[in-house]
Image (tube, grey):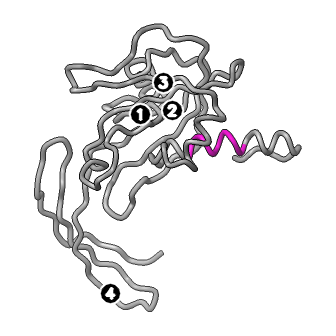
Amino acid sequence: MRATKILSSEVVAKAWGTLTEYTFQYSKLSGELTEITREVYDRGHAAAVLLHDPERDTVILVRQFRPPAMINGGDPFLLEVCAGVLDGDDAATCARKEALEEAGVVVKDIRLITTAYGLPAAVTEVLSLFIGTYDSKTQQGGGLPDEGEDIEVLELPFQVAFQMISSGEIVDMKSIVLLQHLMLERFATSNNLSPPA
């Protein structure tokens, strides 16, 4: 394993999350030591869940305002799976809580698909991705107004949601990964292959 070391760190900004400037030292492939300075954003780890009703083959997605999309000149109201920061919960508990708060859905069965970095070049967040089953909405959903959430809840046929990836209507990475995983599972089952791990 190559040598790595944090030489210095300085908090640049702290509000919703913490932006810190670090200077790192690491050994290159050649063995030579090098230094880089990067800003790293930390707001904790998170969980996301694709809500799927296998009986009706529907999924529930949520649409909410996302400032970075607006800054990039795109539609800032992104269609996504339910997700949120762990805030001290384990990942599965967080996913269930976000499904209830955002979509008004009680998750029945939940399974972890993967845990991964979304933007490892600049963000510390590790995201746990789940697929959860549901059979009804128990309350309105829409998020927590005291947290500034104003969330639209949509229930769609799975195939319609999946096609929204190629049409550009779904551009959120975690949602794309989970929808594609569900499609891969179907492909594997219909072709008598082992489902993806």
Q: Earlier in the sequence, mark 2 or mark 1?
A: 2
Q: Are marks 2 and 1 in contact (CB under 8 Å)?
A: yes
Q: Is residue 119 above or below residue 147?
A: below
Residue that label 3 marks: 154
Where does label 2 land, which residue? Answer: 49
Per the rendering, the mark at residue 33 is: 4
Amino acid type, label 3: Leu
Q: Secondary structure at mark 3?
A: strand
Q: Which residue is mark 1?
A: 83
User: Residue drawn 25% across and 60% down?
Assistant: 40
- Counting residues from the start of the chain, the first of labels 4 and 2 encountered is 4
Q: Earlier in the sequence, mark 3 or mark 4?
A: 4
Residue span colored magenta? 177-184
Mark 3 vs mark 1: in front: 3
Residue at 61%, 40% (x, y): give it: 162
Q: CA distance from mark 4 to mark 2?
A: 41 Å
Of the two numbered discs 1 and 4 on the same chain, state the one appearing first in sequence: 4
The picture places residue 113, in percent across and down from the top left corner, at 60, 41
